[in-house]
Amino acid sequence: MLRSSLETEAIVRPPSRPAGASITASIVTHGSGDEITSCLEHLYASTHRPLEVVVFDNASCDDTLERLEAFSGRIRVVRSSENLGFGQGNNHALAGARSGFFLLLNPDVLLPPGSLDRLAYHLETHPECGAVAPLLEEGPERRLGGFEINYPGLKRIPADWPELPGTIAFLKGACVLVRGALFHELRGFDRRFFLYGEDIDFGLQIRRAGYTLECLGDVVVRHEGGHSECGRSPRLVEAQRYRALLQFYDKNYPRRTMLRLMLRDLLRFGFRWTVHRLTPGGAARHKAEGYRGRLETCASFLVSERQRLLR
């Protein structure tokens, strides 16, 4: 699969180093020419540790690869002839990495000076922590986020669902530092997730392995966000988002719980679609299209489930 779909340049396995002595950063790009240069410049200023940088390009059609030429000799570029998605891109980029810590970094994230060293120090001094992230400053409102304390639909999970370590459910995948050995132990991201949902599932698998997740309030990074949605219709974006959520339900929740959540969502999405359809204005039409995408995805899955049960 990798050999047939990828064209690689300068693929060299890094030498084995003591855990914690170095960091391998993985950046997955797709039409990221406007962001990648600034992202890399901030990344190099964020740490004094030995740093390997791997950029996995998901078949960009812009000038991303040309912009990367300015960093020749400092980064390793893996070119994919097709868009494999966020999770698989990181898996391929980190497949041969042997550093103590792996940084999962979006190209639209700007790390402040010293911030990566701060994240690495936290993992070194907190052995119970499997992955750590900064606070993300997102959107034009510059709201702070980057983590969630609950999984989607958690209130409908059976009471006997096992208790998990820590209080954070998952870290948003824009900027996360994870233990390298743990990443390999979990085999990275589940390849069934193309875009969206993989960070929710990955956080759950880290906690199931016995580790906590942490978000440091004294480290704040700028995340532009929305890059992967630029130019796409709200209908397609929300359909893909909800499809990823269904994959998370299907993998991690009992079947009965999943179907209950889907029926709840079907009623909720139908009501909101109707309200926005009847509300004048472009913003309402935009939201209505998004709920239409969710409704279509939910209905399609329920139909296929019914057909499966009737066989």
Image (spheres, helix red, strand yellow):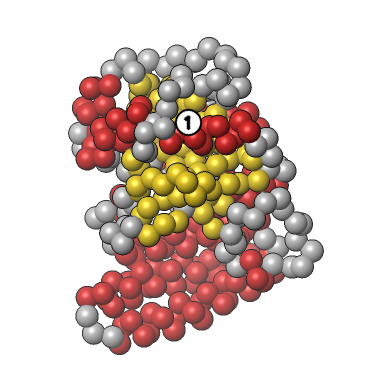
Of all residues, the one furthest to the front in this rendering is: 218
Helix, strand or loop status at disc 1 = helix
Number of marks drawn: 1
Location of residue 228 in the rendering, given as x and y in whole percent from the top left corner:
33, 50
Q: Is residue 197 above or below residue 152?
A: above
Q: Nearer the viewer, residue 19 or 246?
A: 19
Residue at 51% from the left image edge and 76% from the top image edge: 266
Quadrant location, the C terminus: bottom right
Instruction: Evaluate whether residue 199 shows in this view.
Output: no
Q: Quadrant of residue 160?
A: bottom right
Residue at 23% from the left image edge and 22% from the top image edge: 70
Instruction: Evaluate whether residue 181 shows in this view.
Output: yes
Residue at 53% from the left image edge and 32% from the top image edge: 120
Q: Nearer the viewer, residue 206 or 113?
A: 113
Q: Nearer the viewer, residue 180 or 46?
A: 46
Q: Nearer the viewer, residue 206 or 84?
A: 206
Q: Is residue 20 above or below residue 302?
A: above
Name the residue tied to disc 1. 117
Of all residues, the one furthest to the right in this rendering is: 160
Q: Quadrant of residue 116?
A: top left
Q: Quadrant of residue 107?
A: top left
